[in-house]
Amino acid sequence: MNTRTYYFKLPLLLGLLIFMIGCGSEQKSDAYGQFEAEEVTISAEASGTLNSFMVKEGMKLNAGEKVGQIDSTQTHLRKQELQATVKSIQTNISKLDAQAEVYQEQLQTAKKDLQRFTNLKQSNAATQQQIDQAQGQVNVLQKQISSVNVQKQSVYAELETMETRIAQIQDQLEKTKVINPLAGTVLSSYAEPNELVSTGKPLYELANLEEMILRVYISGAQLPTVSLGQEVEVLIDKNAEENESLKGQVRWIASEAEFTPRMIQTKEERVTQVYAVEIAVANPDGKLKIGMPGEVNF
């Protein structure tokens, strides 16, 4: 009787043992988290009517691509006004240069007359008065030339000021162009064509979804096993029962723990500290989405 009972229970015990081994073989991941992306908000750098805006959610944009234009009519008019002022200043400079040339020619003639009267004075063919008059003419012309040079310096300073203002206006004109600064996918659009915008108003938000960031949290006990640049295994849900394995790389580890207790006395308490870790994961086919859960094995 006992022998038959033993043989009857043996298959049941073996099955239970296999089941327990199978349950115990289920490996848990080292950390869990969600995928993020580095989101960038692009804002208007000028004020005015948004004459054109070609950004829609889901669009892929290239770095340096022009995606909109803010009205720049008044800025263009100010630039034209300044350019006209510059031309007027340049004309004044040309006039001063011509005047200086005339004075230089007159000065050369006056110096020759002074030298001639000086020579004649030695033979008593010229008077001291004639020499004094010639010297006075030379002095007057030299002062006139100096005066012209001073005027030119003032006009050149004015020209430099105008050129600086034109450069500022040109910078303002460039800022009326909405230029996408980096490659990425548009996540949200906050503006529409013909809308009045002001400097600093958010226009759209984009992120580079070609590389996603899995942000996980690890304990202090796990911290020594994780290092920057470390290659890790990332798991995502393939279906309801299976995971898909991807490659990732640790790119950032928090230097301070989060949710730290005020007093940490024992080792058991220290391991309850949580450190944030960011893992970069390539996403060329776009299967990874913002907010998607993920697991990692170090």
Image (spheres, grey):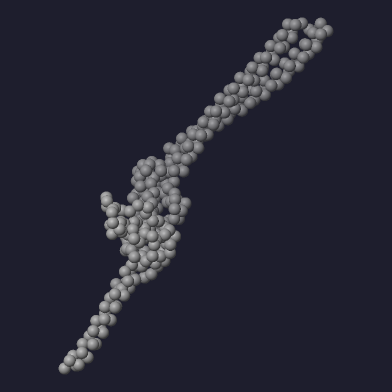
| Whether residue 30 is situated above or below residue 140 in the rendered picture | below
Residue at 64% in and 17% down: 143
Q: Residue 248 falls in which quadrant of the image?
A: bottom left
Relative to 133, 49 lies left or right = left
Q: Quadrant of residue 10?
A: bottom left
Instruction: In this rendered view, identify the residue nearer to me: 273 or 90.
Output: 273
What is the residue that sits farthest to the right in this orientation?
123
Residue located at (47% from left, 40% from top): 171
Image position of 64 with respect to 10: above or below: above
- Residue 31 appears anywhere in the view: yes
Where 102 falls versus 229 (above or below)?
Answer: above
Q: Residue at x 72, y 11 (%)?
A: 134
Q: Quadrant of the N terminus?
A: bottom left
Which of the pair 153/6 is nearer the observer? 6
Percent coordinates x, y for residue 145 in the rendering: 64, 20
- Residue 90, percent across and down? 58, 30
**Between 100 and 243, the one nearer to me in the picture:** 243
User: x and y percent of residue 162 in the render?
Assistant: 51, 32
Observer able to see residue 292: no
Location of residue 243 in the rendering, given as x and y in whole percent from the top left corner: 34, 71
Q: Is residue 149 left or right of residue 5?
A: right
Q: Residue furthest front?
A: 266
| Residue that appears at 32% across and 71% down | 27
Splitting the image into 4 quarters, where does residue 154 fall?
Answer: top right
Whether residue 242 sits left or right of residue 146 in the image: it is: left
